[in-house]
Amino acid sequence: MKITVAGEKKEVADGLTVSALIELENVETPQYVTVSVNEEFVDSEGFESTVLREGDEVEFLYFMGGGR
Amino acid sequence: MKITIREADFRLILDHALAERPDEACGLIAGTDREDGVREIKKVYLLTNTDHTNEHFSIDPKEQLAAIKDMRANGLSPLGNWHSHPESPSRPSEEDKRLANDSRASYLILSLQEEGDPVLNAFHVEGEQGSREVRKEELEIV
């Protein structure tokens, strides 16, 4: 199936989960990454259970924060 | 690495940070990494600090997502982020270092500690948690 990852169209296996996509994309420090699918944010607890579908648009965002 | 920011963009950040006091203000920077090695900031984003305190900042992920899409639509690359230190110097705190998870990013810190004398510096943070190395980047306001 075709999905869009960070703005790039990609062909991936049917039934791919968010968790598997994170591994496939070699995402650095995944524990600090927020994932959105079609502009809806997915909780990290849901990475394993969220199955991607044809046409999905996925974004990986690094948490950005700090303090004085 | 040398990094440049336009005077007008510096003013945008400064005015926003002053308006947000006593809270920390934050946002993203976007632009291009030129072939001559200069990182050129072409656009700054003024985003919401969802912590709303003078001690911490967290960038609103929804606004972050919208900014990333805007960068893509305008042919810009995400270059890092900026935040203000209303009451402390322009240098990464221990928390800043701990949360600097993108080794490719530039981290701009605007100190408002001295009234009327804002200080903006850029930093690069590398290494694993607990042994983070901070390097100051050469920042020029153009």
Image (cartoon, grey):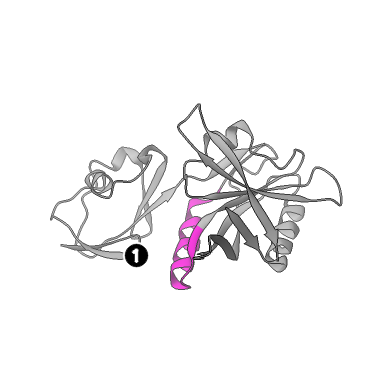
Mark 1 nearby-residue class (10 Å; few <14, some 14–19, many ≥20) = some
**Residue drawn at 47 percent across, 41 percent down:** B101
| Chain containing the residue with disc 1 | A
Q: Main secondary structure of the magenta part?
A: helix
Which residue occupies the extreme bottom position in the image? B74
Which residue occupies the extreme right position in the image? B116
- Residue B20 position, x and y percent, is 72, 52
**Does the magenta run of residues contain B75?**
yes
- Residue B132 position, x and y percent, is 52, 32
Residue B63 can be seen in this image: no
A19 vs A39: above or below:
above
Which residue occupies the extreme front position in the image? B36
Q: Closest to the observer: B52 or B113? A: B113
Which quarter of the rendered picture does the C terminus of chain B lie within?
bottom right
Q: Closest to the observer: A55 or B73? A: B73
- A15 to the left or right of A42: left
**Residue drawn at 86 percent across, 47 percent down:** B115
- Residue A25 position, x and y percent, is 27, 50
The amino acid type of the residue labelled 1 equals Gly
- Range covered by the magenta-colored residues: B59-78
Q: Name the residue under label 1.
A: A7
